[in-house]
Amino acid sequence: MHDVAIIGAGVTGCALAYTLSSYEISVLLLEKENDVAMGATRANTAIIHAGFDPEPHSFMGKLNVEGNRACYALCEALDVEHRRTGSWVVAFDKEQRDALDVLHQQGIENGCKGLEIVSGDEARKREPNLSSEIIGALWAPEAGVINPWEFALAMAEVAVRNGVRFMPNTEVTGITGASDHYDIETTEGHYRARYVVNAAGVESDSIHNMVAGPAFHIVPTRGEYYLLDRSIGTLVKSIVFQSPTSAGKGITVSPTIHDNFLIGPNSEKINDPQDTSVTRLALDEIREAARHLVPSLDTRASIRNFAGVRANSDINDFYIAFTAPGFLDLAAIKSPGLTSAPAVARLAKDMLKAEGLSLSQKAHWKGGRQVIRFKEIPEEERKAFVKNNPLYGRVICRCETITEGEIVAALKREIPPVSIDGVKRRAGTGMGRCQGGFCGPRVLEIIAREQKRDPLTIEEDARGSQVLTGTTKREDCAHA
Ligand SMILES: Cc1cc2nc3c(=O)[nH]c(=O)nc-3n(C[C@H](O)[C@H](O)[C@H](O)COP(=O)(O)OP(=O)(O)OC[C@H]3O[C@@H](n4cnc5c(N)ncnc54)[C@H](O)[C@@H]3O)c2cc1C
């Protein structure tokens, strides 16, 4: 029997696993996909929101600002790529200018620091590529950008190092409660835990409904994106938001931690929560809206389009509550869920403790994490690295200059990747202009060699996305 079973290894589940891993309890992290961060956590705008957007007194209002500060602290402690860029919300007319005052006031109530409303001219002085039609803007210096999947992975890796049992490819299909525990049915067998935490993102209403009557309903809402090549230069240094509407924060032009630009997302209610297709109509809408903000923006520099699905719901807040004794929902975690995750985890830990979970600190908790990013190492040290391990002298991803040494190191981490995109999320291969066109086959070979697997079994991404078909002879595998 485990003390706590967490359902879902997105950023919410990983943040809780990380938090609980410092206590003398046994924790199980169940995930239906083959890796961490396969839901909304990997396909979003990657913004550490400042916290002026959510209504005060909501969970989102309370947890965003705390999460913002905790995110920066965790990124430092766990060597997660991030940058404090600041953000603008811009206004084109009087109505939008008045809305800035509301956001400003909300931000102050939520605890944001350094908020400032400036004229259109002042905003353009600081960001010369902003539209000449902007008449005012709200500046939030605490906003930033992050590598979202690395954030979740980093927390999960530390959790696993400290004893959390991560079970990928394990879909929860049913839950039954007994007097002092829950029995959890999965596609990989049966588990038992004293406490169950539902962090299943767009599926969190289905998991909730396994133990109680419906309390909220997820309204899956897709957002599509363009990812622009960094060759377009510095369009803007900070994140630029449209004035928000009831549908969300609007279209954003945002730098990424790798100096690309993300533009999007639109907001479209869909029926299938797994539908991450991109559509011509949405991309046209995004392009026009983004050009309205930054007229010189050129989407011909697009290197990828993708979509993520928000766990929006019929309540305009996160749903955080004990649904039944010992069963905690961390559900309907929509934006700013990435930013809020560490604060949601802290709250969940406190709620579990108040519900009777006994928490005593581990004497030998192994925190911290460091990643070798070879291209960022000074020239002299690089030579020493290559001398020590010649694999660091072999560049596999030419766009991003990622070496074989980094790929092999990623394959040896606490949660080894099993797919080409799993390596991409850890080592950064395939993130550049060719999007893996050149390095993908080489990464596949390295996975096969290091994990002693038949190349035919290696997936591009999720389960069932094998790249190769045909037959392999045993001797081919040995030499792969
Ligand atoms: C388009 C878009 C833009 C966004 N932009 C931002 C932003 O810039 N900043 C920000 O702070 N937030 C943003 N968000 C919100 C943020 O991405 C999410 O709130 C956050 O990632 C939610 O994390 P999660 O762990 O709750 O859910 P998820 O990441 O979706 O994880 C849930 C996990 O549960 C697993 N699961 C589901 N059902 C089962 C089952 N039956 N058994 C086992 N496992 C199961 C899934 O496979 C998944 O891995 C955005 C979201 C979207 C979609």
Image: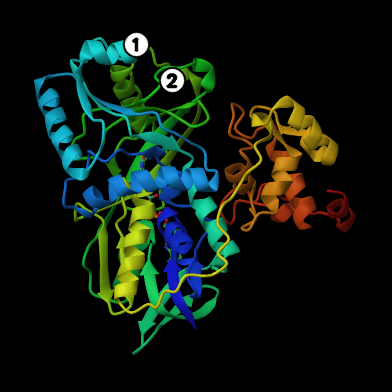
Q: Residues within 10 Å of mark 1 (few under 14, many from 20)?
A: some
- Up-down: is 404 above or below 243? below
Which residue is drawn at the image coordinates 49% and 66% (left, top)?
Answer: 22
> Quick one: which residue is furthest to the bottom in this view?
179
Colour approach in the figure: rainbow
Q: Is residue 194 left or right of residue 396?
A: left
Q: Secondary structure at mark 2?
A: helix
Q: Give residue 353's position: percent from left, percent from top.
A: 34, 73
Q: Is residue 154 left or right of residue 390?
A: left
Of the residues shown, which amino acid type is indicated by label 2? Thr
- Up-down: is 472 above or below 54? below
Q: Residue 173: name its quadrant.
A: bottom left
> Quick one: which residue is furthest to the right in this view?
475
Q: Nearer the viewer, residue 46 or 250?
A: 46
Q: Nearer the viewer, residue 27 or 424?
A: 27
Q: Earlier in the sequence, mark 1 or mark 2?
A: 1
Q: Is residue 309 at least partly visible in the picture?
A: no
Q: Give residue 76's position: percent from left, percent from top.
A: 50, 43
Q: Nearer the viewer, residue 343 or 470?
A: 343
Q: Give residue 28's position: percent from left, percent from top.
A: 50, 71
Picture mark count? 2
Q: Is residue 275 left or right of residue 156?
A: left
Q: Nearer the viewer, residue 446 or 414?
A: 414
Of the residues shown, which amino acid type is indicated by label 1? Pro
The label number, if any, that marks residue 299 in the structure image: 2
Q: Give residue 70's position: percent from left, percent from top.
A: 39, 48
- Up-down: is 210 above or below 430? below
Which residue is drawn at the image coordinates 44% and 52% (left, top)?
Answer: 39
Which residue is drawn at the image coordinates 38% and 77% (left, top)?
Answer: 195
Q: Residues within 10 Å of mark 2 (few under 14, many from 20)?
A: some
Residue linked to disc 1: 128
Q: CA distance from mark 1 to mark 2?
A: 19 Å
